[in-house]
Amino acid sequence: MPEPRFLQLSDVAEVLNISSSQTYALVRNGDLPAIKIGGRGQWRVERTALEDYISRLYTQTRAFVEAHPLGGDSEEE
């Protein structure tokens, strides 16, 4: 059976290993694109949007690491 195109916020939270409230905040502040469907307005995140979001985070993290090499004034480990 193919993977579903859309994920519930609880599924996204599990993939990212974060809480459901953190996932909801990502959606509400526009960092993670999602749609609201149904009469009760439940949020769904397209699988490709989640993968794009993860790719963006890798790019941002890589830029941060390059700008803040080990041994310099950086955040604690």
Image (cartoon, rainbow, N blue to C red):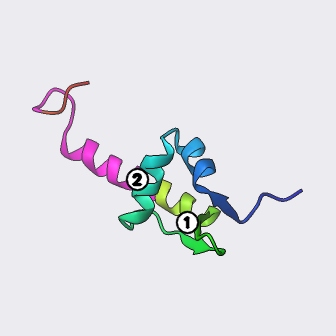
Is residue 72 covered in magenta?
A: yes
Q: Seen from this angle, which residue lies furthest right?
A: 1
Q: Is 72 located above or below residue 28 in the figure?
A: above
Residue 57 place in picture, x, y as percent: 40, 53
Residue 45 place in picture, x, y as percent: 58, 64
Amino acid carrying mark 1 in the image = Ala
Q: Is 47 left, or right, of 17 in this rendering?
A: right
Q: Assess disc 1: are there few (<14), some (14-19) or many (≥20) residues with their C-alpha within 10 Å of its C-alpha.
A: some
Q: How many marks?
A: 2
Residue, x 58% and y 71% (percent of image)? 41
Q: Assess disc 2: are there few (<14), some (14-19) or many (≥20) residues with their C-alpha within 10 Å of its C-alpha.
A: few
Q: Seen from this angle, which residue lies furthest front?
A: 40
Query: Under tag 1, what secondary structure?
Result: helix
Residue 40 place in picture, x, y as percent: 61, 69
- Name the one closer to the observer, 54 or 12: 12
Please give the label number shown on residue 63: none
Residue, x 40% and y 56% (percent of image)? 25
Screen quadrant of the N terminus: bottom right
Please give the label number shown on residue 49: 1
Upstream in the sequence, badge 2 or badge 1? 1
Q: Is 27 left, or right, of 63 in this rendering?
A: right
Give, as a single range, the part of the protein colored magenta: 55-73
Name the residue beneath numbered marker 2: 57
Query: Under tag 2, what secondary structure?
Result: helix
Is residue 35 covered in magenta?
A: no
Q: From mark 2 to mark 1, how far is it between C-alphas?
A: 12 Å
Screen quadrant of the C terminus: top left
